[in-house]
Image (spheres, helix red, strand yellow):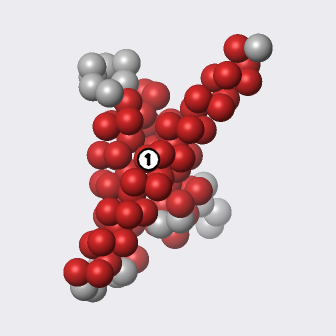
């Protein structure tokens, strides 16, 4: 069966970045927190869940990689939205 969203997709930076960007835009209207903070929290949760589901969380080094990967995803997600917003604003 074809799946649009899978754990393998969420384990990648590009897949998680798109999901984090979409969820951040939905959540920021309800919660009055900085969207970059929301993106970082969501990215950390999504990458941790994907790593647990795929069995990739085996050592302390994996936790460090998750935190690093989450920050890259959060920065990319914020940048994706700003790029699209500026493109359609012109």
Quarter of the image that includes the C terminus: top right
Q: Is residue 63 left or right of residue 47?
A: left
Q: Residue at x 63, y 23 (%)?
A: 85
**Quadrant in the rendering for residue 31:** top left
Outermost residue on the bottom side: it is 58
Is residue 19 visible in the rendered image? The answer is: no
In the rendered view, tell whether residue 28 sits above or below residue 78.
above
- x%, y% of residue 5? 54, 56
- x%, y% of residue 23? 43, 36
In the rendered view, tell whether residue 28 sits above or below residue 5.
above
Q: Which residue is mark 1?
A: 74
Residue placed most toward the observer, 34 or 42: 34
Q: Residue at x 56, y 56 (%)?
A: 15
Q: Residue at x 38, y 35 (%)?
A: 36
- x%, y% of residue 33? 27, 25
Q: Residue at x 27, y 72 (%)?
A: 63
- x%, y% of residue 7? 46, 66
In the rendered view, tell whether residue 64 sits above or below residue 76.
below
Outermost residue on the top side: it is 90
């Amino acid at each position: 069966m074809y799946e649009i969203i899978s754990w393998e997709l969420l384990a990648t930076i590009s897949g998680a970045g798109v999901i984090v960007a979409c969820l951040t835009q939905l959540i920021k209207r309800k919660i009055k927190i900085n969207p970059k903070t929301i993106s970082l929290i969501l990215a950390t949760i999504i990458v941790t869940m994907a790593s647990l589901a795929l069995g990739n969380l085996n050592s302390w080094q994996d936790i460090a990689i998750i935190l690093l990967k989450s920050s890259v995803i959060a920065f990319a997600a914020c940048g994706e939205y700003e790029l699209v917003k500026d493109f359609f604003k012109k």
